[in-house]
Amino acid sequence: MIDHVGYLVRDLEAGIELVTESYAAEVTREIDRPQWSLHGYYVGAIEVFTFTDPALLDERLGGQEAQLDHLARAVDDIEAEMETLRGLGARFSGPDLRGEVEEPFDLGSLHVWTRPETTNGLCLQLIEYR
């Protein structure tokens, strides 16, 4: 099941304003993941976020101001989903896409992101809620 879409923006305030006005929606919660230099907000099922590390932000956005970054799926068994995707050639990372991981991250629920170059250009976030 689709959980949310991630929208990476250079200017977080402008990104939030655009999404809240475009969808007549309000911010529902804030996220702060300093281990990945990530800060953002949820507006319904849209995660609007930025990276506080300028080099990482430039690397991910290039010359763009914003881009659709990832699609998040809620799954019942994240390990089984990872194994299925591994069988198709997928490799995994955190949301900053730096380095690779073998296990999901425990952030109150389990999370992992696919490396886009291993999944036909799509960054897929898997989430197992507990």
Image (spheres, rainbow, N blue to C red):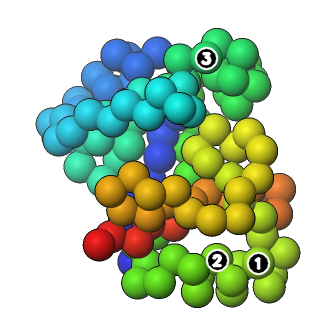
Question: Dot 2 corresponds to which residue?
Answer: 82
| Residue 129 relative to residue 105: left or right | left
Q: Amino acid at mark 2?
A: Met
The type of residue carrying mark 1 is: Arg
Residue corresponding to mark 1: 86
Q: Quadrant of residue 31?
A: top left
Which residue: 40% across, 84% down?
76
| Secondary element type, mark 2 | helix
The structure residue drawn at horizontal position 54% and vertical position 26%, both measured from the top left corner, is: 37
For mark 2, does the 10 Å Cα neighbourhood hold few (<14), some (14 to 19), or many (20 or more) residues? many
Where in the figure is residue 101, as x and y percent of width and height? 71, 57
Residue drawn at (33%, 56%) of the image: 108
Which label sits on residue 19?
Answer: none
Q: Residue at x 69, y 23 (%)?
A: 56
Distance of label 1 from label 3 (alpha carbons): 30 Å
Question: In the rendered structure, which amino acid carries the disc numbered 3?
Answer: Asp
CB contact under 8 Å: marks 1 and 2: yes
Reply above or below: 37 against 83.
above
**Which quadrant of the figure contains the N terminus?**
bottom left
User: Mark 3 sits on what residue?
Assistant: 53
Left or right: where 91 falls relative to 44: right
Kindly indicate whether the residue at mark 2 contacts the one at mark 3 (C-beta within 8 angstroms): no
Q: Nearer the viewer, residue 42 or 35?
A: 35
Q: Position of residue 9 (x, y in %)?
A: 51, 26
The answer to whether residue 92 shows anywhere in this view is: yes
Q: Indicate left or right for 67 with 63 as reference.
A: left
